[in-house]
Amino acid sequence: MAFVGGSHYLAGSGMKPRPRSEEWFARAQRCLVGGVNSPVRAFRAVGGTPFFVDRAEGCRVWDIDGHVYIDYVLTWGPAILGHAHPRVIRAVQEAAARGTSFGIPHPTEVQMAELIGRSLPSVQKLRLCNSGTEACMTAVRLARGFTKRDKLIKFAGCYHGHVDSLLVKAGSGALTFGYPDSAGIPVDFAHHTIVLPYNEIEPVRTTFATYRGEIAAVILEPVAGNAGLFLPKPGWLEFLRQITEKEGALLIFDEVMTGFRIGPGGAQERFGIRPDLTTLGKIIGGGLPVGAVGGRAEIMDLLAPLGPVYQAGTLSGNPLAMAAGIATLEELGAGSSGIESSAVYKRLEHLGARLELGLHEAARSAGVSIVFNRCGSMFGLYFTDQPIWNLEDAMRSDRERFKRFFHGMLEAGVYLAPSPFEAGFLSLAHTEAEIEATIRAAAEVMRKL
């Protein structure tokens, strides 16, 4: 048996045996739809059988067959401190001893809201919920209730959860109303959603001119992390802020991924834009189910019980999620003087920059063209020699080569997202040693592509 980068191999074969994962996946397919509880986990985008996890700690996960992987998925973003961080585990244990759910107001949900408000000045008031999907659904409902308009602009490649009116793809032209991207959604539900290309100004300007006084909001991921990763072009977010203010529409930042991930104040701090509404999730739950929508008080006060926009949830503000989230945010330095949080994010930036440089060097050495888009500790890897600014660009990348790269890295003990259209993440548990091991593995795999 050889040992490389923290992962065992079958001598001579280069393939790790995973009989227990194979057995459990076969068992899962008999009782779970597709054998999974979220589609990307099924490995359909890369082929093969998913491995089943036994445990996770720090920046590593162990599968049930005894193999260990350096993890760049990090439960799709929340594990910014690394898996099973002692402070988070302790906070959850202490909270669970007092009760797993109340359905009654409790101090930690107030503490969470205060902590978020101190970190994001645009959030004057907050409503906690249970997922990013629920947060985005509520934000859109609030925008429509506040503006008394129906139409919504979203961008191709941005995912805002599986809400009927947001699970929409573009029609035949830039101004074509969307049609459902999923069976089971009536066309009328998507009729008021207009899908435009990310990072392009003129389609937005034309849409507002065509439907003047009808658009309630523009919703977007300020850094798109659901089609790999692409960043906003300079000036684009500023344009969206200006035109929404001019036209009386709201600007909604979906920061479920970027909130507390790419900086202590998320994308809105990093790019200097103040949205009207912000949706959050992932990191603010410390790995437990959570969501939140917040923004200007005059908009948020339209929510029940103060206003006519209804939203409710039995488990909203769950004490375990609040405990885990507060522990995570405090560990990141949220709500502090700024010195502590600055050191944390500088560390993440350093790790991200080293990974970016190393993968570019590995690709050049192997004669392979890649685009590695990165924003802080989020990244996206595409096999192409063309810039990636939107979904159309991403779709032109070499997906077959990504499949081979993914499986090569998995065999080398490195777990990347099992799709070229998902972001990768770094944690504070990653060290230079793991980054260098990853770069070495990538150089070897790229030489064989």
Image: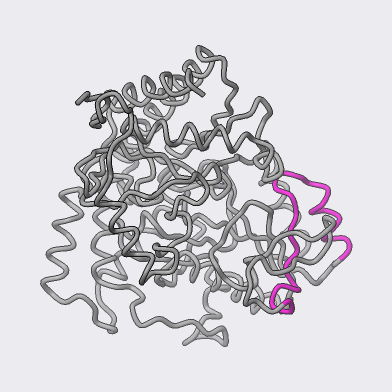
Residue 216 is situated, as x and y percent measured from the top left of the image, at 71, 70
Q: Residue 315, located in which quarter of the rendered image?
A: bottom left
Residue at 59% from the left image edge and 62% from the top image edge: 276
Q: 375 or 373, which is in the foreground? A: 373
Looking at the image, which residue is at 49% across and 68% down? 135
Asked if residue 13 can be seen in this view, the reply is: yes
Q: Is residue 315 above or below residue 152?
A: below
Instruction: Return the residue nearer the eye: 335 or 240.
Output: 240
Question: Looking at the image, what colour scheme do you see?
Answer: one colour
Quadrant (top left, top right, bottom left, bottom right) of the N terminus: top left
Say if 60 sits above or below 105 in the image: above
Answer with the quarter of the image where residue 136 lies.
bottom right
- The structure residue drawn at horizontal position 30% and vertical position 70%, both measured from the top left corner, is 109
Instruction: Please state the horizontal and vertical placement of residue 88, each as a whole percent of the image.
Output: 20, 54
**Extreme-top residue of the structure:** 365
Task: Name the residue nearer the viewer: 293 or 365.
Answer: 365
Q: Is residue 14 above or below residue 92?
A: above
Q: Is residue 158 left or right of residue 18?
A: right
Which residues lie in the magenta part?
187-210
Residue 331 in picture, x, y percent from top left? 25, 47
From this view, report whether residue 294 is shown above or below residue 380. Answer: below
Residue 410 is drawn in which quadrant? top left
Residue 82 coordinates in the image, percent (x, y): 27, 44
Answer left or right for 286 relative to 40.
Answer: left
Residue 193 on the magenta segment: yes
**Residue 20 painted magenta:** no
